[in-house]
Amino acid sequence: MSLQAELARVIELFQFPFMQRAMIGGVLTGLMGGMLGSFTILRQLSFFSDALGHAALLGISIGLLMGINPSVVLLPFAVLFALGVTYLLERTRLWTDALLNIIYSSSLAIAIIILSFVGEYKGGLNNLLFGDILAVRELDLVFSSLLLIVCVVLVGLTLRTQMLVTLHEPLAIARGVSVSAHRTAFIVLLSLVVGISIKAIGVLLVSAFVVIPACAARLLSRNFTNYVLLSAGLGAFSAVVGMVLSAAFNLPSGPTIVAVQLTIFLIATVLPYVGSVQGYGSH
């Protein structure tokens, strides 16, 4: 098949409403994940999104066992999980990664036990783990759009405070900032973003949308505002490229998007080195 015919086939695919919804859903998820991820990695909460993804599987399992739609259970469970983790982080002296590892592994173990009693859903376990972005509905896009607006408003109105809490927490406390309240609000918002993204991206891959674009942007940015904007932009860009490659080569959408994110990250690791070599050669 010629390149022109292949391009025409991909364009034709994106005429279908389900592909358009998938593309929009991917962009919204990429924007939210990248924006919040820029704060997440600097606050050393990268493992939180992964732990929440696996804990969400527990919430889904409980919903299935009780005969409740998993989508109804997922967001309230994610918020309760976030509040519980915040409480444990503030009340225990354990390291963050150690505590999250306990929650991560135990939630996954309990979820698998519960799923073993829900025989009729075993065929959909693959969609839970890796997502099904092509199944995104208009209602999912509405929720994602509203959540993106909340993210933009919160980050936009409190950017200086968020920067201070992220980069110099003792100074934020000295200036009278309620660090605990800001931390709780941020973690709850992150939990909602992860929770609403699981349907499209899946339990195993959702943390990549939070961590990888932010890490790539961190390597390419020189100031905090540009870092946040670039992280969100890379998240959205990787979603678009991943969806196009997925359609062109008949690849699974979620994993393809993550592969694109990884490629961008690897390029970002090389660019500063190339720039330094060129700068050295010009002297």
Image (spheres, rainbow, N blue to C red):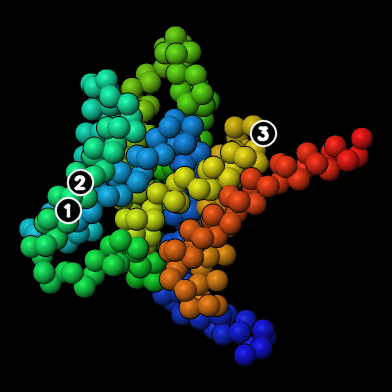
Which residue is depicted at the point 47% across and 45% down? 211
Quadrant of the rendering where the N terminus is positioned: bottom right
Query: Residue 107's mark?
Result: 2
In the picture shown, does residue 74 fall above or below 219?
below
Looking at the picture, how far across and down is residue 100, in whole percent?
29, 36
Give the residue at x 33% y 22%.
180
In-front residue for pair 14/276: 276
Q: Which is more foreground, mark 1 or mark 3?
A: 1
Q: In terms of secondary structure, where does tag 3 sit?
A: loop
Do the numbered discs 1 and 3 sit on residues whose CB atoms are within 8 Å?
no
How far is the residue under mark 2 from the one under mark 3? 38 Å
Residue marked by disc 3: 222
The residue at 14%/50% (across/down) is 110
At label 2, the amino acid type is Ser
Residue 91 at x, y percent in the picture: 23, 21
Q: Which mark is residue 157?
A: none
Q: Secondary structure at mark 2?
A: helix
Amino acid found under the numbered disc labelled 3:
Arg
Task: Look at the image and tell me whether residue 143 can be seen.
Answer: no
Q: Residues within 10 Å of mark 3 (few under 14, many from 20)?
A: few
Asked if the residue at tag 1 contacts the one at tag 2, i.e. Cβ–Cβ closer than 8 Å, the answer is yes
Is 191 left or right of 106, judged from the image as shown? right
- Residue named by callout 1: 111
Please name the amino acid that badge 1 sits on. Ala
